[in-house]
Amino acid sequence: MITPPTTLPISVAEAKAHLRVTVDDDDALIEGYIRAALAHAEMMTGRAFVEQTWEFVVDAFPTVEIGPLTPGPVTSAVVIYIDADGFEQTVDANDYELDVSSAEGWVVPVGAWPSAMETINAIRVEFTVAPEFIPQDVKHAIYLLVGHFYNAREAAGAKRDAIPYGVDALLGLHCRIYI
């Protein structure tokens, strides 16, 4: 991840209403729980739910496409490589197509990829994911997780609660394989 999410999938005020919290003392804590719940939702589904920028790195140009670029949905990408002389270059955007229709993004050359230096991490794709909306069931999973984190603050001890079943059921709707 190059640029982490700067927006939240639900506001602190929405989370506080869900938690029935009326004081501001725990606002920073609740915001942290929202970010943790978002990270969990994105990890479980392999999808991004708020805008962020990622990097995909390979040692050489493949014969065809570069990818999959995850998490998706990918909205834009820039292909950067180290040329034969050791200088960083950017592939002209007209020389490749970006698959933005698939769940995972792919970068496909229009012709052939340029020549790159044979070195580790010679090719880098910087891509942005910017979903148009967050599905309501994902928001509900985030509410459930925030509530769980807020009400079970300690992760150790004799009585340790697992992630609520409803979270996996809701997030499973957005996975390739139901969890």
Image: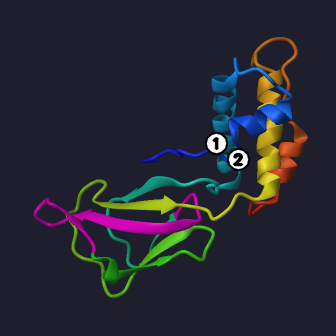
State if disc 2 and disc 1 touch (CB < 8 Å).
yes
- Check if residue 41 falls in the magenta segment: no
Q: What is the distance, in whole Å, between disc 1 and disc 2 at their CAs?
A: 6 Å
Q: Residue 32 falls in which quadrant of the image? A: top right
Residue identifier under label 2: 41
Q: What amino acid type is highlighted by mark number 2? A: Ala
Residue at x 57% of width, y 57% of height = 71
Tell me the quarter of the picture where residue 107 sits.
bottom left
Residue 156 is tagged as none
Magenta extent: 69-91
Q: Residue at x 70, y 47 (%)?
A: 41
At a point 69% along the width and 41% down the height, the residue shown is 11
Q: Find disc 1 in the rendering and name its residue.
A: 39
Q: Amino acid at mark 1?
A: Ala
Query: Residue 34: x and y, percent?
Result: 68, 36
| Residue neighbourhood size for the residue with mark 1, other residues' Cα within 10 Å, grouped as few (<14), some (14–19), many (≥20) | some
